[in-house]
Image (cartoon, grey):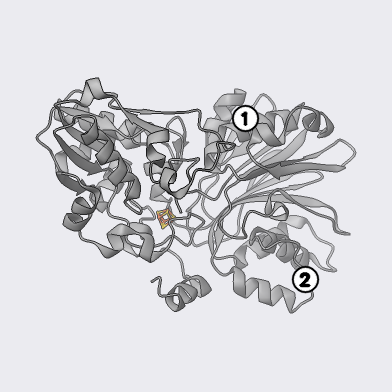
């Protein structure tokens, strides 16, 4: 169901942050999480470790500013901290699923936070439960902790060995930050599906899902964590270890298209620049006879600028977003919900009246939002609305932690481009090609599974279940 409180039909699962060696580490984590808030609004948490090695945690449901009001941060002492913002897909929105998780163990306490989805979680959970593990939550992130504990059982050896063995058992998309009393480990899946970057703040090191979290605290980007790599951060600085020789660079294409903030750089490519280039390519592939170009705020504005630049048509603010619809907004009735887009977006009558409009959007998921926006522009006097989408038709669900919903809900899985065009009431409709997704970022590899159905990993039970449900 479309969330009224957000214009986003797609949801990233999470964002992670960690900092080693800084005064007021928890407060810096708070600012970092705030910059990552777009990656998850359901819940958040911070765990810190003080100089005596004591772990402290605060977490809760809601936005970063709702969960942390000041006094909680003062309690989270120490020069190390990790944090997490969550959107609940796998595991639901219960408080015990809000991360970071904290584990007590005779080999030493540790905490972890995760972004992504483990596709063999059902098998691993069964494997662990059969060996005596008791799970506190339904989140699959906890599986890594149990694997680490199991792999360390009864053996005196550095924890990194247990972490490497545990990571090797996971299949799917993940970026993990793991914090022990002395160090932070930053780990990324071997396919490179989820982003994770390292930054530097004076003598301190920072790790985050997106580089926009570095900018907000004045940290400098150092490098990305490589696929299949664990970066250990401690008083020695950074150390790199590989847990897998298999290595791809199949970054989630939706990070560039939609999820990430435009001021973030993902694997050396600025997100705004990527989107702008995708808009230029979109014009080259699908020009439209029109008077103005309008982007859907906020994530489509960069692509709309690129389209306008390439076409020579004026880029106009034909749609304005109401930024002040908060989570406490009163839930409307079904009838009012039908008008939901109007609460978030308004067409600027004086700009669109009498004009042929090219409407640039980043993606079409269910089609309901596009239909409403086209209607909004026409009601405001647009004579024609030509919809151009800066990604290919979405035809398959995501199993890597993105809530792209089910097969039946994806309009392009059921309808041809011409049918979708009629459904949304547009005068014409065109999507960007899959090839252009690679071209826009000058990339050889990407995950484009939700556009092609070609998944980079095995899917285990996820696909079996989808098959059973008739979703795939
Ligand atoms: S399937 Fe789509 S949303 Fe999921 S990781 Fe791949 S590109 Fe991203």
State the image coordinates of residue 241 (x, y, percent, origin top left): 62, 52
Which residue: 21% across, 42% down?
Answer: 387
For label 2, the crowd category at 10 Å Cα-Cα, with few meaning under 14, some 14 to 19 and many 20 or more, is some
State the image coordinates of residue 245 (x, y, percent, origin top left): 52, 61
Which residue: 38% across, 41% down?
Answer: 339
Corner quadrant of residue 36: top right
Which callout, 2 or 1, points at the residue further toward the start of the chain? 2
Residue 241 relative to residue 145: left or right: left
Front-most of residues 271 and 299? 299
Which residue: 13% across, 39% down?
Answer: 287
Front-most of residues 302 and 156? 302
Residue 463 relative to residue 329: left or right: left
Q: How far apart are marks 2 and 1 (CA)?
A: 37 Å
Total marks placed: 2
**Residue that mark 1 sits on:** 200
Query: Which is in the foreground here, disc 2 or disc 1?
Result: 2
State the image coordinates of residue 296 (x, y, percent, origin top left): 33, 35
Residue 38 relative to residue 184: left or right: left
Q: In this view, does 408 lie above or below 69?
A: below
**Residue that mark 2 sits on:** 133
Ligand 1 shown in quarter: bottom left
Q: Residue furthest top?
A: 350
């Amino acid at each position: 169901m479309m969330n009224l409180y957000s214009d986003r039909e797609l949801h990233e699962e999470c964002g992670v942050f960690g900092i080693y060696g800084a005064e007021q580490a928890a407060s810096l984590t708070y600012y970092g999480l705030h910059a990552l808030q777009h990656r998850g609004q359901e819940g958040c948490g911070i765990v810190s470790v003080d100089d005596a090695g004591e772990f402290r945690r605060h977490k809760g449901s809601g936005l970063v500013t709702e969960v942390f009001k000041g006094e909680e941060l003062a309690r989270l002492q120490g020069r190390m901290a990790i944090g997490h913002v969550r959107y609940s897909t796998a595991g639901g929105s219960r408080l015990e699923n809000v991360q970071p998780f904290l584990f007590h163990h005779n080999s030493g306490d540790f905490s972890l936070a995760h972004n992504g989805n483990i596709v063999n979680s059902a098998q691993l959970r069964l494997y662990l439960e059969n060996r005596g593990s008791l799970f506190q939550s339904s989140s699959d992130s906890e599986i890594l902790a149990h694997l680490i504990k199991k792999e360390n059982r009864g053996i005196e050896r550095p924890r990194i060995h247990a972490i490497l063995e545990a990571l090797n058992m996971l299949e799917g998309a993940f970026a993990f930050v793991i914090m022990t009393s002395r160090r932070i480990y930053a780990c990324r899946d071997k396919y490179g599906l989820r982003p994770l970057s390292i930054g530097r703040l004076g003598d301190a090191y920072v790790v985050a899902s997106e580089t926009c979290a570095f900018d907000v605290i004045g940290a400098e980007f150092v490098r990305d964590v490589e696929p299949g790599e664990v970066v250990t951060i401690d008083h020695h600085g950074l150390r790199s270890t590989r847990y897998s020789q298999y290595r791809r660079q199949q970054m989630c294409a939706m990070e560039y298209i939609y999820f990430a903030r435009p001021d973030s750089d993902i694997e050396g490519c600025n997100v705004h620049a990527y989107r702008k280039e995708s808009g230029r390519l979109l014009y080259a592939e699908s020009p439209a006879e029109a008077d103005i170009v309008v982007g859907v705020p906020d994530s489509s504005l960069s692509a709309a600028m690129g389209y306008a630049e390439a076409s020579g048509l004026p880029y106009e603010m034909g749609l304005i977003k109401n930024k002040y619809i908060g989570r406490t907004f009163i839930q409307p009735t079904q009838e009012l919900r039908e008008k939901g887009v109007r609460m978030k977006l308004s067409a600027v009558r004086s700009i669109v009246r009498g004009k042929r409009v090219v409407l640039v959007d980043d993606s079409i998921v269910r089609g309901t939002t596009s239909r409403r926006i086209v209607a909004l522009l026409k009601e405001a006097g647009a004579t024609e609305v030509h919809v151009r989408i800066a990604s290919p038709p979405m035809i398959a669900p995501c199993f890597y932690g993105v809530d792209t919903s089910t097969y039946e809900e994806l309009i392009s899985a059921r309808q041809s481009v011409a049918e979708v065009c009629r459904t949304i009431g547009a005068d014409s409709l065109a999507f960007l090609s899959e090839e252009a997704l690679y071209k826009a970022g000058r990339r050889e590899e990407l995950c484009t599974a939700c556009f092609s159905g070609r998944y980079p990993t095995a899917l285990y039970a996820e696909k079996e279940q989808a098959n059973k449900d008739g979703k795939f």
